[in-house]
Image (cartoon, helix red, strand yellow):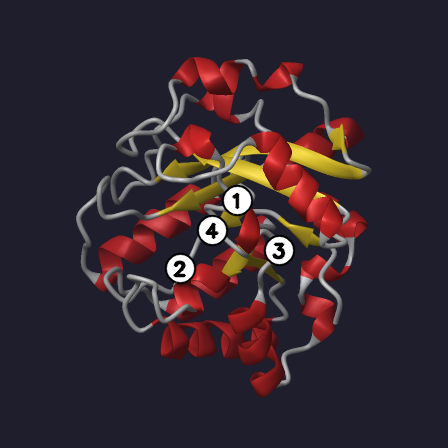
Amino acid sequence: MRSVLDSHAHTIASGHAYNTIYEMAQTAAEKGLELLALTEHAMAMPGTCHEFYFLNLKVLPRQMFGIEVLFGTEVNIMDFEGKLDMEQGLLAQMDVVVASLHTPCIRPGTQAENTRAYLRVMENPAVNIIGHPDDGRYPVDYEELVAAAKEHHVLLELNNSSLSAKGARKNPVPNDRKMLELCRSYKTPIIVNSDSHCAADVGNHTYADKLLKEMNFPEELIVNRSVEEYKKYTNRFRKQKQ
């Protein structure tokens, strides 16, 4: 399957990434993508941009180098009740929102606590994607996660960076296998993302694609196949239909 989009990537604004908006967009276009979403770390992540950065995203063009470019955030889940580090009004202005558990922002909890955090977050109408739910440092009940994602029309992410040998996340391969088997069973769609922090990794889904191929995962459950299918899940295009 050809992936036409990447919906989780970071620029220098996130503090620990290495390329600009225009460099990331140009590379995405050169690689043949049709859409790139830039999702900077929200304010609780050490070293990232200020709230004002997100307030001003409205000034940026959504077409660059012949492709669509969306601007959003990767928010941090701050507690096990689903609190996020961005105010709801601003969150709703983002083109796309990824919500993730990160060790600088929340200590790992029990399986029940981590699962509850994800379930509460998915109840938030501004959240579109659950980022890298494969980190074994945050054990989770994958059946509950997959069922809730389908119920709330939220995408579960297969994160290519997690699957890299250089990655810091714990046991991503068995966790992703478990999640994907349940997604197949429940017919819950997923999104494959690079989580790139440099232009060279934009659209890089090598490890994720290998796992999907090994598992013979159904293409119809992968939204990367179609920009129009992806848009059904994002804040920017949901609002246009209201």
Name the residue tied to disc 2: 133
Residue type at mark 2 is Pro
**Going from the N terminus, do you reach mark 3 or mark 2 first?**
2
**Residue occupied by mark 3:** 203
- Seen in the image, is 163 located left or right of residue 233? left
Q: Earlier in the sequence, mark 4 or mark 3?
A: 4
Callout 1: few (<14), some (14-19), or many (20+) C-alpha neighbours within 10 Å? many
Q: Amino acid at mark 3?
A: Gly
Which is nearer the eye, 50 or 115? Answer: 50
Q: Mark 3, mark 2: which one is toward the viewer?
A: 3
Label 2: which secondary element: loop
Residue in the picture at 41% in, 36% down: 75
Q: Is residue 50 above or below residue 17?
A: above
Proximity of marks 2 and 4: CB atoms separated by less than 8 Å: yes
Say which amino acid is labelled 4.
Ile
For label 1, the SS is: loop
Residue indicated by mark 4: 130
Q: Position of residue 231 (x, y in %)?
A: 73, 44
Q: Nearer the viewer, mark 4 or mark 3?
A: 3
Q: Which quadrant is home to the C terminus?
A: top right
Instruction: Check disc 1 and report the residue beneath it.
Output: 9
150 is higher (above) or lower (below) than 210 = above
Q: Amino acid at mark 1?
A: Ala
- Distance, label 3 to label 1, CA atoms, is 9 Å
Report x, y in % for residue 208: 54, 70
